[in-house]
Image: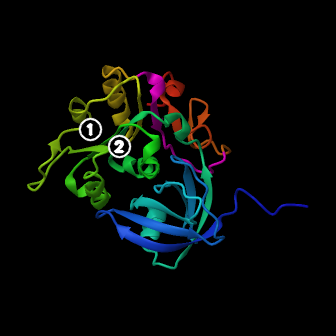
């Protein structure tokens, strides 16, 4: 029997909730019209179509659920598709393809400590990993979360960060590059938080996502702490277009970020000149 499935045809989903995270970033909650779970894994992305406008890739920010067909993405308003998304009202229809790409190997992390290093919007995909671990808290060791933004106005998920900061089983440290008059936390780039943390490099895995300029310095700090390179994971989101490895828009030295990535162990890309 011939299947009607095509990886190029979006599936319908409905906007069920939206919430502003700051002046430019909004959290969107969608439900698949099929009633089926998205079946993504932490670190993967989807292609979102706004009918009549276009399609763009977005990281899934919510953790995987097998009992729920809702999922979340957080979107910064920067172009035609993202502006159209921000203009949608609850009840609006979109199209989705995916999930696509590699993901964080959660089973490898079981029983291990974990260090999150999130720069700017990098917290959006890392939130999927973090909330998965918090939901299965007994399976993981010590958790440490470092979050950096350029200024207090660009912080996102501030209510959730305030809530999880109260937990005794998770260390949360934040910093901003440029404080305002009300900011009382750390000031400086995200690597200024590394001297404040205590980890065991033999039992700690690292996941870091942020602006490209951040990676090299974060990896240097991890090396100073003695964390082996094969315990460091990064996510490289480079102009994903088709999500199927066909168009070549996201290639890095022969690797397709949409297929081979976006999540890479650092040892996979350490020698690739275009990667970091």
Q: Is residue 157 left or right of residue 33?
A: left
- Camera sees residue 113: yes
Query: In the image, what residue occupies the spot 59% across and 45% down?
Result: 101
Please give the label number shown on residue 190: 1
Which of pointers 2 and 1 lies earlier in the amino acid sequence? 2
Query: In the image, what residue occupies the spot 61% across and 49% down?
Result: 100
Q: Nearer the viewer, residue 81 or 257?
A: 257
Point out the residue furthest to the left here.
181
Q: Nearer the viewer, residue 119 or 197?
A: 197
Q: Is residue 230 left or right of residue 165?
A: right
Mark 2 Cα within 10 Å, few/some/many (few <14, many 20+)? many
Please give the label number shown on residue 253: none
Q: Check residue 231 for magenta coloring.
A: yes
Magenta stretch? 228-244
Query: In the image, what residue occupies the spot 48% across and 39% down?
Result: 236
Please give the label number shown on residue 118: 2
- Camera sees residue 262: no
Q: Secondary structure at mark 1?
A: helix
Q: Position of residue 221 (x, y in %)?
A: 31, 26
| Residue 187 position (above or below residue 96) | above
Q: Secondary structure at mark 2?
A: strand
Q: CA distance from mark 2 to mark 1?
A: 8 Å
Q: Position of residue 36 (x, y in %)?
A: 64, 65
| Residue 18 position (above or below residue 1) | below
Query: In the image, what residue occupies the spot 39% across and 46% down?
Result: 122
Circles 2 and 1 in contact, beta carbons < 8 Å: yes
The quarter in which the C terminus is drawn is top left
Q: Check residue 127 for magenta coloring.
A: no
| Residue 169 position (above or below residue 223) | below
Q: Position of residue 120 (x, y in %)?
A: 33, 48
């Amino acid at each position: 029997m011939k299947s009607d499935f095509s990886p190029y045809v979006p599936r319908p989903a409905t906007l069920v909730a939206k919430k502003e995270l700051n002046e430019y970033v909004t959290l969107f909650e969608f439900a698949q019209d099929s009633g089926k779970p998205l079946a993504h894994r932490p670190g993967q992305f989807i292609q979102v179509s706004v009918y009549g406008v276009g399609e763009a890739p977005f990281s899934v920010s919510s953790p995987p659920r097998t009992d729920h067909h809702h999922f979340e993405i957080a979107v910064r308003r920067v172009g035609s598709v993202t502006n159209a998304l921000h203009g949608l009202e609850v009840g609006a229809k979109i199209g989705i393809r995916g999930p696509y790409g590699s993901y964080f190997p959660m089973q490898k992390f079981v029983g291990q400590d974990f260090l999150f290093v999130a720069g700017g919007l990098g917290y959006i995909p890392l939130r999927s990993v973090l909330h998965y671990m918090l939901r299965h808290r007994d399976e993981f060791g010590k958790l440490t979360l470092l979050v950096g933004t350029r200024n207090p106005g660009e912080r996102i998920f501030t209510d959730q960060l305030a809530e999880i900061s109260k937990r005794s089983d998770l260390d949360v440290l934040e910093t901003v590059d440029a404080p305002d008059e009300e900011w009382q936390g750390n000031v400086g780039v995200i690597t200024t938080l590394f001297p404040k943390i205590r980890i065991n490099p033999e039992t700690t895995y690292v996941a870091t996502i942020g602006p490209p300029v951040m990676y090299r310095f974060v990896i240097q700090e991890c090396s100073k702490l003695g964390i082996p390179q094969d315990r460091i994971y990064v996510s490289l989101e480079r102009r994903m277009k088709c999500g199927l490895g066909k168009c070549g828009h996201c290639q890095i030295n022969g690797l397709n970020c949409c297929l081979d990535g976006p999540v890479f162990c650092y040892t996979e890309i350490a020698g690739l000149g275009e990667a970091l």
